[in-house]
């Protein structure tokens, strides 16, 4: 009876493994080896499922399922280097990894170590190709000197000691993602004025001064184009309060939830936190970042 229950429920276990494999596809090619590992796991699980079905269909003693389990376990031995790829800590600094990194990324590196091993490098500018920005798949295909954004926006990070205020977007562009308070620049308003206003509207915090850190420019495959100005603030009054637009919360600067943020944040936010000013350009297709380039500015 127990073996029949296992056989009935086992299909859901296989579905779960294959669902993980499909999720890993989002991080391809950085998930190439881990995608292979989950497929092998699914294949071994299917072998055991077939053996259980044979035992049940032939009316054999159910205790044979224990010996049947030895077959997929034996197959694991020659495949162990292909299977045991998942780590809970960074292989470089031993910091705990978030679940997305554990499941997806073959390198098993935390964001800080990834950025250190893949530093942003200034490159010689290339001649821009004559390509419609919405059709571009590489930032070098866009003439950024003549490129004009449809929307202009701001982000304002507020710091309190070793914590920074973030929000979970409840509505509008980027709904569901973790980001900083911010929004559109209104007509006749400077970027810094917009940062102060949007911060108060989304979190009820009030700041009187903000510090410019950099500019991010986005071209989306659906035609949307946006320029954002990034600001930091180190003093404030009031208490963070949830609004219709955002749920604010404090996060340790040393452990930011990059897995729930836009993909570009891992590239430029560590630079800003180190005091490096920058101009960053990105091409996105939905949530997927296709290309990027970051220029470091003299400070």
Image: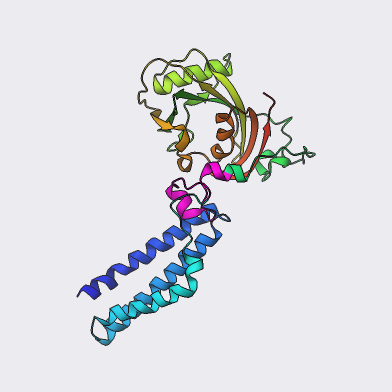
Span of residues in magenta? 92-114
Q: Residue at x 40, y 23 (%)?
A: 203
- Position in image of residue 20 (x %, y %): 43, 58
| Total numbered badges shown on the rendered structure | 0
Is residue 286 in sight in this rendering?
Answer: no
Please, is residue 34 above or below residue 200 in the view? below
Please, is residue 70 above or below residue 223 in the view? below
User: What's the colour scheme?
Assistant: rainbow
Residue 192 is covered by the magenta coloring: no
- Position in image of residue 134 (x %, y %): 65, 40
Q: Residue at x 42, y 38 (%)?
A: 176
Indicate left or right for 126 with 188 as reference. Answer: right
Indicate left or right for 8 with 42 as reference. Answer: left
Please identify the residue farthest to the right as the structure is shown: 127
**Viewer-nearest residue: 176 or 78:** 78
Q: Residue at x 63, y 38 (%)?
A: 282
Indicate left or right for 62 with 54 as reference. Answer: left
- Position in image of residue 209 (x %, y %): 52, 14
**Viewer-nearest residue: 41 or 160:** 160
Please identify the residue farthest to the front as the structure is shown: 93
- Position in image of residue 50 (x %, y %): 36, 78
Please identify the residue farthest to the left as the structure is shown: 1
Is residue 127 in sight in this rendering?
Answer: yes
> What is the quadrant of the N terminus in the image?
bottom left
Please, is residue 75 above or below residue 161 in the view? below
Indicate left or right for 212 with 58 as reference. Answer: right
């Amino acid at each position: 009876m127990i073996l029949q229950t296992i056989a009935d429920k086992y299909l859901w276990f296989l579905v779960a493994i294959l669902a993980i494999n499909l999720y890993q596809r989002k991080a391809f090619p950085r998930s190439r080896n881990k995608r292979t590992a989950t497929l092998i796991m699914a294949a071994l699980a299917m072998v055991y499922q077939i053996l259980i079905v044979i035992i049940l269909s032939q009316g054999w003693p159910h205790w044979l399922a224990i010996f049947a389990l030895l077959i997929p376990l034996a197959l694991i031995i020659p495949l162990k280097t292909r299977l045991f790829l998942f780590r809970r800590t960074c292989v470089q600094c031993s910091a705990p990894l978030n679940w997305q990194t554990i499941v997806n990324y073959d390198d098993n590196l935390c964001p800080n170590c990834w950025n250190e091993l893949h530093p942003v490098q200034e490159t010689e500018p290339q001649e821009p190709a004559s390509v419609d920005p919405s059709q571009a798949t590489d930032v070098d295909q866009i003439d950024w000197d003549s490129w004009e954004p449809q929307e202009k926006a701001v982000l304002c990070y507020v710091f309190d000691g070793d914590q920074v205020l973030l929000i979970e977007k409840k509505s509008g562009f980027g709904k569901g993602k973790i980001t900083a308070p911010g929004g559109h620049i209104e007509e006749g308003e400077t970027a810094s004025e917009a940062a102060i206003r949007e911060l108060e509207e989304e979190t009820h915090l009030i700041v009187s001064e903000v510090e410019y850190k950099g500019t991010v420019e986005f071209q989306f495959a659906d035609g949307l184009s946006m320029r954002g100005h990034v600001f930091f603030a180190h003093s404030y009054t009031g208490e963070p309060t949830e609004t219709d637009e955002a749920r604010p919360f404090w996060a340790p600067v040393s452990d930011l939830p990059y897995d729930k943020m836009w993909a570009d944040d891992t590239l430029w936010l560590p630079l800003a936190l180190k005091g490096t000013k920058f101009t960053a350009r990105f091409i996105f297709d939905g949530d997927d970042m296709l290309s990027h380039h970051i220029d470091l500015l003299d400070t």
